[in-house]
Image (cartoon, rainbow, N blue to C red):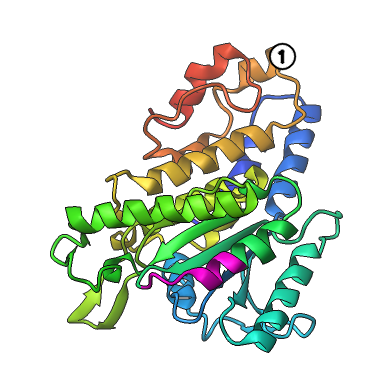
Amino acid sequence: MTDFDREDIFANLEYDVQHSDMSETLKNKMLTNILHLRDQKINIMITGATGSGKSSTINAMFNADVAKVGVGVDPETMSIEKYTLHNLVLWDSPGLGDGKEADNRHARNIINKLAECDTNGKALIDLVLVILDGSTRDLGTSYELINQVIIPNLGPNKADRILVAINQCDVAMKGKHWDHEKNMPDPVLKEFLDEKVQSVRRRIKEGTGVDVEPIYYSAGYKESEHDKQNPYNLSKLLYYIVQHTPKEKRLVYIDNVPNNKPELWRDNDDLKDYSNEIKKTWAETVIEHVTSGVETGAEIGRSIGGLFGKTGEMIGGALGGFVGAVGGFISGAISTIGSWFGF
């Protein structure tokens, strides 16, 4: 990833709009849209059984230490811990499997939190990330959590608001088929993990009628300078999280991505550059939402060449193959959008 933060993005967006040759009406509309983007917050509920690796996932993915980050227990939800990382709010909830009384309490707390609305009357929780323990075959309580507690209380667009991730894929077969040198599963383990993904998808579909697309990953660990393992598929997981986030909220992650740790982005099952893919989603957000409600007539057509120059330089250096007219631009601006991001 690159060395910039969200405030830099917004400062440059404002600069680019203010210094364009568009009319004051268009400038004011775009500046209003920029302020709207800046105010966005994301609320993600992260749940899973004890030992599934929720804390290590949060720490690695969002460059945080949940033991030191303004942790506070929400008094209304008791066992759900709240972590505030700039405009990203994480709600860490226990899964099931702690006994009948505790499970009933956890289920009630999750249901109550999913029922909460923000100040605009929309669901407070944007996404539920359910982390499964890839080292165990017994996922019965996890299916109960997903099929009986979470999905029935997600409201409409259920598939867009839940993501299932199988952590600790490196020890899924007692670690026997993990290639530590290459930091990846060997063919035997990969086949096992692919089958596990299909099994999880099938069990959830049969139980709820909802199609999910689970992925497997390892959050990695670092016990000492000489004993550590880099993450695997972690950037793929973050990409999936971004893709499940409403577009207007995706820039929030810029403040929380560990942009100086290339080892987090390197090892993936399909060798795809997910850091690049994530930056494409940021570009889509900029184009679509900064120009939302703006007429796509001759004036913006003439101005697009000089618009977002500084922002384009900041986001766009590694955007690669992002093509197409996004956000309602006239078709003649496609090539200009391409040059804007340097490809």
Q: Nearer the viewer, residue 95 or 33?
A: 95
Q: Can you see residue 143? A: yes
Up the image or down, 176 lies above or below 246; here it is: below
Residue bounds of the magenta highlight: 136-144
Q: Quadrant of residue 260?
A: bottom left
Circle 1 residues within 10 Å: few <14, some 14–19, many ≥20: few
Give the residue type that dot 1 points to. Answer: Gly
Point 67% across, 57% down: residue = 151
Point 78% across, 34% down: residue = 29
Q: Nearer the viewer, residue 306 or 196?
A: 196
**What residue is disc 1 on?**
297
Q: Can you see residue 267? A: no
Q: Position of residue 208 (x, y in %)?
A: 64, 52
Q: Position of residue 185 (x, y in %)?
A: 22, 59
Check the image and name the residue furthest to the front. Answer: 206
Secondary structure beneath dot 1 equals loop
Image position of 273 (left or right of 79): left
Residue 191 located within the stretch drawn in magenta: no
Point 29% across, 45% down: residue = 270
Q: Position of residue 224 (x, y in %)?
A: 24, 85
Q: Nearer the viewer, residue 64 or 315?
A: 64
Image position of 196 (left or right of 315): left
Up the image or down, 317 lies above or below 200; here it is: above
